[in-house]
Amino acid sequence: MKPRVLKRVKLILPALTEATSPYWRPIKYSLFPPLGLATLAAYLNTDLSISIQDEHVEKLDLDDDPDLIIIQVYITNAYRAYQIADHYRARGAYVALGGLHVTSLPDEAAPHADTIFIGPGEDIFPRFLLDLAAGTPLRRYESSVRTLQGVPPIRRDLIKRHSYLVPNSIVVSRGCPHHCTFCYKDAFFAGGRGFYTQVVDDALAEIARLPGRHLYFLDDHLFGNTRFARDLFRGMRGMNRVFQGAATVDSILRDDIVEEAAAAGLRSLFVGFETLSPDSLAGAGKRQNLGRDYREVVRRLDSLGIMINGSFVFGLDGDNRDVFARTVDWAIDSGITTATFHILTPYPGTALFTEMAAQDRIVNQNWDLYDTRHVVYRPSGLTPDELKRGYDWAYEAFYRWGSIARASSHHQSIKHCLKHFFYSTGWKKFEPAWDLVIRVKQLSQMRPLLEAILSPVNNSGTNAAGAPGDHSTRMWPTTLSRNTGDLKIALLNQE
Ligand code: B12
Ligand code: SF4
């Protein structure tokens, strides 16, 4: 091959299948910009013509003729990604495919690409660019050097900030120290380190570059390295930020890292509870949750005024028909702010997939259905139909007006009750309003509202009412219902 002179490079995030399904929620896909692509773009020469297109927020322009096309492939956008790749190869562009699904199934992706990439891009993408310029690109690159030291700053200037509610999404680590059998993590990071962080000063510099107050850490496990997390949160004090992130049950109970996070501005946390059954936890390799007191996790976060997005999985071996009501009741009675329910999904490349394939339990390999909303395997204690109906019921039951009001009442201060109520209803009950805001391109106007809801419960970052963890003070049935009686009645009437 002759050395290639690049002039125009286009990076594409094809729409996930959901974009054309009844589950499509424009707001969910207008939250975060394609950070992975902006990360890769940082390795391209700045004098090139570079564009990032995200099909979730814009119609793709497919009539152009870029020299190099970079496509990020998730499992549920794989077919769309291959279609776009084939289209551009037919037009003479050099097409590179990478991401989670390419890493899981390289042989499936390879016929649609000139080059495929296995694993994170930080070492292999710049290597590929050099080879391409020299006219010697390989068909396949596999990441083995895993570090975030010295990576160039993400090309955030290429992100259309106005199209997203949370343009300030950020990742300061890669991977996770744990090994749950259903998670993509071990497969994606095979052949090298599975968990590593940025240098703290680099992460703080990246944060300092972000305008506004609100941040969303997309790291799989923000508390995964305690020393790093502590230094990061201490460095963030005084930066006047409010932020959201994700962490595991054990890390919340382990030491004082969650207090450090709260003092730095943590206001809501995604927590992988997954299941209330110890046997199912053990079966899923989720050892870090075993024997942990979930109520204590909730109490601790609640005492710091941190809202909780609880993640739960249905269909684990050991689950039967009562799992749905048990889980939803627990989540409501614990005052979980928002819940994400999943149907267990054996992603190719994971230990779960291998195990189920060996037991001949995978019944469907249409990747479009691997969105954690469909049953693609044979569950053990439920029929596929019971699992699907139970999952749908769980969402419906958790987000009823009455359930939201009930869950909101389980906090120690009125402010936290109200924040819970508005955050949860804002997320799930005002879909047409969000659609309108997105259509008239005013999403960025909603950010101050989000920041206001994420303001501290009180000035010290802990709750005003009672000692931390004093759950005897349930404000909603008493003070709150007195203060907002009319509102509550009006809302309950809408069930
Ligand atoms: C943001 C996000 C979303 C956004 C995605 C939109 C967006 N703009 O990114 C939204 C909210 C829409 C979303 C939805 C879902 N998500 Co999501 N999401 C994430 C999250 C938290 C961050 C992604 C990110 O920005 N990472 C940071 C960047 C830097 O990494 P990256 O994107 O992987 O990019 C790197 C590499 O992949 C690689 N790379 C990628 N593309 C290419 C291309 C080339 C050519 C090269 C060289 C390299 C390369 O290089 C990049 C730099 O290293 C990840 C978890 C995570 N921490 O990654 C989960 C994650 C991707 N989501 C996941 C899941 C399960 C879902 C849902 C199914 C959940 C649900 N039930 O709702 C839905 C999808 C619905 C559907 N129909 O499929 C799983 C994916 C599992 C899998 N095997 O596919 C993840 C990994 C979370 C997890 N721990 O399980 N998600
Ligand atoms: S704790 Fe979360 S990110 Fe880590 S391996 Fe388990 S599911 Fe994956």
Image (cartoon, helix red, strand yellow):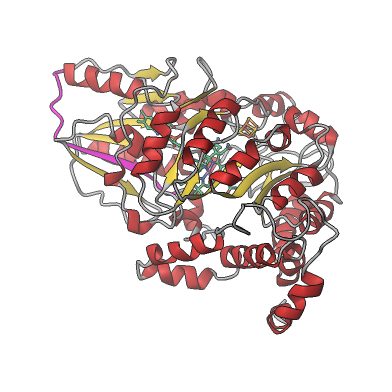
Question: Depth check: 26 or 106 in front?
Answer: 26
Residue 407, percent across and down? 75, 62
Residue stretch rendered in magenta on the structure: 1-15
Specify the quadrant that holds the N terminus. top left
- Residue drawn at (73%, 46%) of the image: 300
Q: Quadrant of ligand 2?
A: top right
For residue 370, say whether it is visible. no
Residue 89, percent across and down? 26, 35
Q: Is residue 356 above or below residue 377?
A: above
Which quadrant would residue 351 be assigned to in this image?
top right
| Left or right position of 429 against 20 | right
For residue 438, say whether it is visible. yes
| Left or right position of 358 against 134 | right
| 352 is within the stretch colored magenta | no
| 12 is within the stretch colored magenta | yes
The secondary structure making up most of the magenta span is loop
- Residue drawn at (72%, 32%) of the image: 254
Residue 120, percent across and down? 43, 26
Question: Depth check: 117 or 168 in front?
Answer: 168
Q: Is residue 401 above or below residue 153?
A: below
Specify the quadrant that holds the C terminus. bottom right
Residue 54, percent across and down? 36, 49
Question: Depth check: 326 or 305 in front?
Answer: 305
| Left or right position of 294 against 269 | right
Which quadrant would residue 111 be assigned to in this image?
top left
Q: Is residue 407 above or below residue 290?
A: below
- Residue drawn at (27%, 36%) of the image: 69
Q: Number of numbered discs present?
A: 0
